[in-house]
Structure formats: C-alpha cells, structure tokens
Image (cartoon, rainbow, N blue to C red):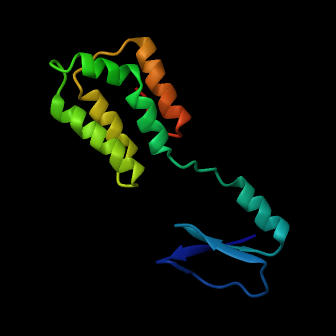
C-alpha cells in the first residue's frame, strides 16, 4: 500500500504504476497494488453500526422511564418530555442526534434508580447508541 497525503480533496501527488484500488479519508489517499492488500485494509476499518431509532423509540415508550413520566406527569418538565418524544420520532426519520436524547432525558427532572439506568442503558446499547446515563 502506498499512502499519499490528501490535500484539499486531492492526492498530493500520484504514484506511478497500476493499482488494484484507490481509496481515501480526510488525511490520506491509499493506493493498493493487490486485492489482498485492499481486503486487509478494508477488514481493519472499524464497523459502524446504524442507529436503530425505531427500536429505541419503541423500547422507551414501553420503558420504566415513560411509565414513570406518565405517572409523575405533574412533576416532570412537560416541554422537555414533548421534545423527547418529538426527537425520537425525528430520529426515525433521520433528523435527530443521539446526544439530544440523552440531554433531554437528563433535563426531565426525574431521578433514576440504578435498575432504571441499567434498563435505559440496555435499550441504548441494543439499538446501537453510544450514549449512556
């Protein structure tokens, strides 16, 4: 593999010869001379799992958090609860960030037991979210 610096979206220079594949990231261009070399590179890249917003939304709607929020409706911040449900729906449509979910949960004015935290963190993990309470 030959590594060439990425300068404004273009290789700093182009090596001579024939190459099996070329790829790039924000820092470098990578020229692969063989298929095996290219496969080794691809296999070394981290796997990025897609966030399962629909799964998280469904899990949270049936969770202790939402059950308590309904029971304690007079003490929670209604605007924040509404924003949380809207954010979950927006996430299903691809228009939300996972950090927003955590921020809104933290602003609900609810105290969570360790079991409730574990339950919610389990939902985050199961649905490929990196956020945790």
Quadrant where the N terminus is found in the figure: bottom right
Q: Position of residue 120 (x, y in %)?
A: 44, 25
Residue at coordinates 35% horizontally, 46% vertically from top-left?
89
| Along the viewing direction, whichever of 102 and 45 lies nearer the viewer | 102
Q: Position of residue 27 (x, y in %)?
A: 54, 67
Residue at coordinates 38% horizontally, 30% vertically from top-left?
61
Quadrant where the C terminus is found in the figure: top left
Is 74 rendered above or below residue 7?
above
Residue 84 sits in which quadrant?
Answer: top left
Residue at coordinates 23% horizontally, 40% vertically from top-left?
83
Q: Is residue 76 left or right of residue 118?
A: left
Is 131 rendered above or below residue 66?
below
Q: Is residue 27 left or right of residue 54?
A: right
Residue at coordinates 22% horizontally, 22% vertically from top-left?
109
| Along the viewing direction, whichever of 99 and 12 lies nearer the viewer | 99
Q: Is residue 51 left or right of residue 75?
A: right
Is 20 rendered above or below residue 85?
below
Is 113 rendered above or below residue 48?
above
Q: Position of residue 72 (x, y in %)?
A: 22, 16
């Amino acid at each position: 593999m030959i590594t060439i610096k990425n300068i404004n979206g273009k290789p700093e220079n182009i090596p001579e010869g024939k190459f099996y594949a070329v790829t790039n990231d924000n820092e470098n261009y990578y020229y692969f001379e063989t298929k095996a070399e290219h496969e080794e590179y691809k296999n070394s890249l981290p796997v990025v799992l897609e966030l399962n917003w629909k799964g998280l939304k469904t899990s949270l709607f049936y969770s202790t958090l939402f059950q308590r929020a309904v029971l304690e409706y007079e003490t929670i911040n209604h605007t924040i609860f509404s924003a949380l449900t809207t954010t979950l729906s927006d996430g299903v449509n691809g228009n939300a960030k996972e950090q927003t979910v955590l921020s809104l949960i933290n602003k609900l004015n609810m105290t969570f037991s360790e079991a409730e935290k574990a339950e919610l963190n389990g939902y985050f993990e199961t649905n490929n979210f990196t956020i945790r309470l």
